[in-house]
Image (cartoon, helix red, strand yellow):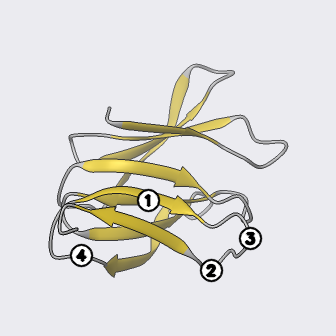
Amino acid sequence: VYAVDWSQTRGENLIVSGSWDHTAKVWDSALSCSLTTLRGHEGVIYSTIWSPHIPGCFASASGDGTLRVWDLKAAACRLAIPAHNAEILSCDWCKYDQNVVATGSVDC
């Protein structure tokens, strides 16, 4: 596991993790088990972040150069953005605008 983030929505006690095996997993900390495994990235997931605005929604950044937005209820990737031509090492959701996610990559 390379990245973890606690959900920011009240009523959810979930953790999302990103891994070297190209998967994101959602965990229920009360049950101490994985609820789902999400696949779609073709590289290491370096960063995961829950949306502070949309329950059950998180973003992941990967070594494959994409940022993906996931819908936990559908257990699916809703948006895949080829954001960089190199590994993306970090991402963060804007606290003030639900439509803005920033990424940081090794391409400077």
Is the N terminus in the top left, top right, bottom left or bottom right quadrant? top left
From the image, tell me which residue sits under label 2. Answer: 99
Q: Residue under circle 3?
A: 96
Which three-letter amino acid code belongs to the residue tagged 2? Asn
Q: Identify the element where label 3 is drawn.
A: loop
Task: Tell me which corner region of the image, top left, top right, bottom left or bottom right, holds residue 39.
Answer: bottom left
For badge 4, the amino acid type reads His
Q: Residues within 10 Å of mark 4 (few under 14, many from 20)?
A: some
Q: Amino acid at mark 1?
A: Cys
> Is 51 on the left or on the right of 65, as rendered?
right
| Count of labels in the image | 4
Splitting the image into 4 quarters, where does residue 29 fall?
A: top right
* Residues at marks 3 and 4 touching, judged by CB atoms closer than 8 Å: no
Q: Residues within 10 Å of mark 3 (few under 14, many from 20)?
A: few
Q: Which residue is mark 4?
A: 84
> Label 3 is placed on what type of residue?
Tyr
Q: In the figure, is residue 23 to the left or right of 53?
A: left
**Residue occupied by mark 1:** 91
Marks 2/1: CA–CA distance: 13 Å
Q: Position of residue 6 (x, y in %)?
A: 62, 38
42 relative to 85, above or below: above
